[in-house]
Image: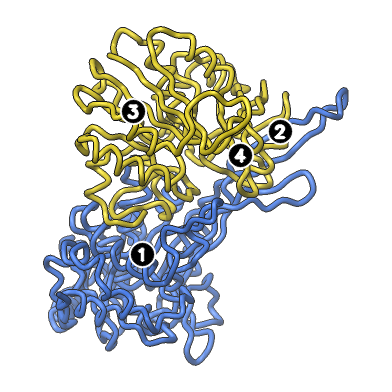
Amino acid sequence: MVSREARFLATDNIPALLRRLGNTYRVFAPVKVSDTIVLFQEFAESAGLALDEQTTLPPKELLFPQTEGLVSYRYRKDAEDLEKSEVQVEETLEAPPTIIFGVRPCDARGLTVFDAVFTDGQWRDPYYKARREATTIVTVLCTQPESTCFCTSVGGSPTGIEGSDIILTIVTGGYVAEPVTEKGETLLQDEAFTPAGDKAGEAGEAREKVSVERELELDGIAEQLLDIFGTDFWEQVTAKCISCAACTYVCPTCFCFTITDDTTGIEGSRIRTWDSCMFYLYTLEASGHNPRPTKTERYRNRIGHKFSYHPTSYEGMFGCSGCGRCIKVCPASLDIRQVLREAKAHG
Amino acid sequence: MDNSGNPFLPDIGTVGKVIHEAPNIKSLQVVLNDQHRMQSFRFEPGQVAQLSIFGVGEATFVINSPPTRMEYLQFSIMRAGEVTERLHQLKEADPVGVRGPLGNWFPYEEMKGKDIYFIGGGIGMAPLRTLLLFMLDNREDYGNITLLYGARSPQDLCYKEELKDWEGRDDMELILTVDREFPDWDRRVGLVPNVLKELAPSPEGKVAVTCGPPIMIRFTLQALDGLGFKDDQVITTLERRMKCGIGLCGRCNIGTKYVCTDGPVFSLAQLKELPPEL
């Protein structure tokens, strides 16, 4: 990322840009759908854009849909022998070219957790991988962190570029756009982007000014969580949890899923659906045995996974991007920052 | 499993022989429909596969025929839930989905030259069967082979035909036990861990491989410890609810390890490094 590649995108030019891109891509951008809810929706000029606040849900659903078909199947009876049947199975994979405009750095960084697990591991997830490759992430850097933001505590930054293809910095009259990847560079060829000139300097200064206090000291947390695994800390901390799983639903890094079959008549679809480690059924075995039978073991695993197991397996990368949504949505006011602070202090 | 393709896309196989092993256990012998896939199917003893009934779902089973006998892939299924209920309804010539091989395998290279002591209970005999047959097919690589196998009752013992064969062999020893007295049962009576204590095999030069119901495994591990077996001389296999089988869906982890990809085979030494969440 060097400044000579910087371009300027006037606010007034954004609708036309997204409209043009809509000819080639599915274009999603944040839309205010009610007083309190902002969601990524397919761009429509009439809806207007809500680029100045955090979306209620992260954009992960566009790369990892809440429900998606993996394979389709169809049974066929043998006309000669009705006792016999055969089944045909086909992969169902759709990955149309997509642009997600107005992503936040924490959510873009959240995708790098998916990348590590779904595309860079021993087994590759062809569905996520195809969508990730077909998607361009246009990120708007933060200017006004919220009280729940803690990206800097988990290695991120309000001006971070990880997971993004283009970053936009707010300047007078619009945004300075800078490419992070080849995909991003391609998009910047559109006529809506003009030479940045002096704006590039203004963008640099603007980025300097933004900061999110690093309120958690997480050095050694991976080992500490193992050390307190068998203590009563977890029972205390989860006393108020109601196992609703809202925290996993809004999380930009939670990737757990289940697979079920959905059949109508002689054909159907094997579908993947978001699942949650906070649910009893998630680990319930057919024998009736459940290795994580209560919310205590389940929450311990959730925190353990994000702050001990994941960083241990993936070179220190936390399974958390500090977006703070789980703090906002928890009906029992469980604050993951407080849990981590207490975990560090325990024993 | 070839990991260049789509790991969620099952192969289609056809059920051959169905064997009624025990009142709630059947074995299915499956051949993949695609001849080339069947011929190129490579797996290691202890690896598992996901069987599917399209419209019901998938479940994980060890491939309990050894890679040295590739006429078919055999799976033994205890009726326990929805998928196993439907797998029990399958009959010869029915289609079934197969996704595999998945998971790790028994460290049979490191076990070469050692005496092998198998300790199985009920359906837990399935993974031991793979390794036992594999070792019998590579007999000169291993020392003495002993199998202690128990079940609740004589009819709950699996692989009855093979038990006769193993009984007759002079290159292995077979000890059978059931939990209590039964008419016409002239073998041992007693729970597997108790019989193991009576037999009191010396740990010298041995590797113990055990699989069975969780309660049996727990007391067997205690018994082995009491006999002086070190943690790296004891190998077992774990079960967990699984969905993807490839370390992505999240549910089968114990700490950093996923039973589906890092397991199902673990030494006791490895298990003791994990958080206690069995």
Residue A18 location, x and y as percent? Answer: 46, 69
Quadrant, the N terminus of chain B = top left
Disc 3 or 4, which lies upstream in sequence? 4
Query: How many other residues sit within 10 Å of disc 4, few (<14), some (14-19) or many (≥20)?
Result: many
Residue type at the position of mark 2:
Leu
Left or right position of A70 against A217: right
Of labels 1 and 2, the one closer to you: 2
In what element is the residue under mark 4? strand
Of labels 1 and 3, the one closer to you: 3
In what element is the residue under mark 3? helix
Residue type at the position of mark 4:
Ser
Closer to us: B69 or A287: A287
Quickly name the residue at label 3: B199
Can you see residue B273? yes
Q: Chain letter for yellow?
A: B
Quickly name the residue at label 4: B52
Residue B100 location, x and y as percent? Answer: 48, 32
Residue type at the position of mark 3:
Leu
Disc 3 or 2, which lies upstream in sequence? 2
In what element is the residue under mark 2? loop
Alpha carbons under labels 3 and 2: distance apart: 40 Å
Of labels 2 and 4, the one closer to you: 2
Quickly name the residue at label 2: B90
Q: Are marks 4 and 1 on the same chain?
A: no
Q: Quadrant of residue A201?
A: bottom left
Q: Chain letter for blue?
A: A
> Which residue is at a point 54% across and 82% down the rendered structure image?
A47
Left or right position of B48 against A154: right
Residue type at the position of mark 1:
Thr
